[in-house]
Image (cartoon, rainbow, N blue to C red):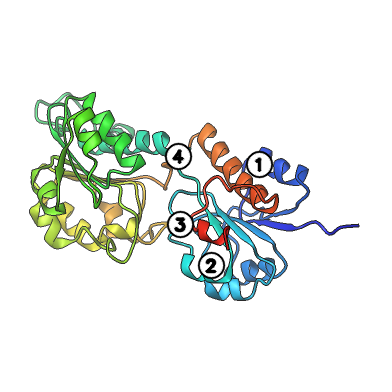
Amino acid sequence: MVDKKKVFVTRKIDPEAIELMKDSGFDVHVWEDEMPPSRDILLQQCKDASALLTLVTDKIDDELMSQSPQLKVVANMAVGYDNFDVPSATKRGIAMANTPGVLTKTTADLTWALLMAAGRLVVQGDRDVRAGKWKTWLPLGYLGQDIYDSTLGVLGLGQIGLEVAKRGLGFDMKILYFDTYRRKDMEEKYGFEYSSDVETVLKKADFISVHTPLTEETYHLIGEKEFAMMKPNAILVNAARGPIVDPKALYEALKSNVIAGAGLDVTEPEPILMDDPLLTLDNCVIAPHIGSASVATRNKMAMLSAQNIIAYFQNKPMPTCVNPEVLSS
């Protein structure tokens, strides 16, 4: 009898993805707890695993890979993979994958939900209604920012950033974007305006949406100096990665009305600590990292992760490998 290759799945996911791997001949082990496995448990499970299906909370570094002699492929159920040590994986011949594309529009929708909630004080109003603080209609009560005819600044015009920008056109917004790669095709097609520097976007935009990957260069990309450049009516939205925005600087900017508000789907750290001062502010809307959280999209992410693992062992092209040079070596 041929031993089945072990796949360790670090959280409960769509059962169809689990069944797909089982039907393909894998021995699938699923971590059933709601909280992620501890580091010790993760290391223990990886000792005899041929594949991992992970989330962004799972640190896949050189230490782990050095103790996983059978590990051949890791599939991250996310677009971002800042939890991966890709150079070490590549050196060790371990293929790594993510789930781009399938969550793009869903995350863009959530970005817009945060933009509108923060811009129009929706959460503050809901909170006051439930607390019995709303006594009458007030001409000067709950005044937010107009979204239509304003300027949307997009930092990072990748797949998600592009979808966020396109939605802005429906509100007759002017779209100003920064990216390390200029998209002249999108400028011609949609009328976007390009800026070669972040500062110009920060100074001109009424709403600023962050969509850069988290790298050494983008860590705390938005800090005290950057907040000082923004308009006093500016709304900052971050649905990318928490550490791109300096949380202490954000708190001071919101508390001191340097900017008008913020909508966050990601924080630093994550989950946000219950004594974080951002939680005391009415002008900060915080969601629990739910950018991709629709039934259909999370199912697609799980299936794509499973398909990456299956394809590797069937010697077929992996749909979304982030270090494809491993496959040709």
Considering only order in the chain, which callout, 2 or 3, is on the residue closer to the N terminus?
3
**Can you say which quadrant of the picture contains the C terminus?**
bottom right
Question: Would residue 36 appear left or right of 121 to someone viewing this image?
Answer: right
Q: Residues within 10 Å of mark 1 (few under 14, many from 20)?
A: some
Q: Which mark is residue 101?
A: 4
Question: Please, what secondary structure does the residue beneath circle 1 have?
Answer: helix
Residue 47's quadrant in the figure? bottom right
Q: Amino acid at mark 3?
A: Tyr
Residue 69 point in image, percent of width and height:
68, 72
Are dots 4 and 3 in contact, CB under 8 Å? no
Tell me which residue sits at (9%, 30%) in the image: 140
What residue is disc 1 on?
17
Considering only order in the chain, which callout, 3 or 4, is on the residue closer to the N terminus?
3
What residue is disc 2 on?
89
What residue is disc 3 on?
81
Residue 160 point in image, percent of width and height:
35, 40
Tell me which residue sits at (12%, 53%) in the image: 199
Rounded to the nearest whole Å, what is the CA distance between mark 1 and mark 4?
18 Å
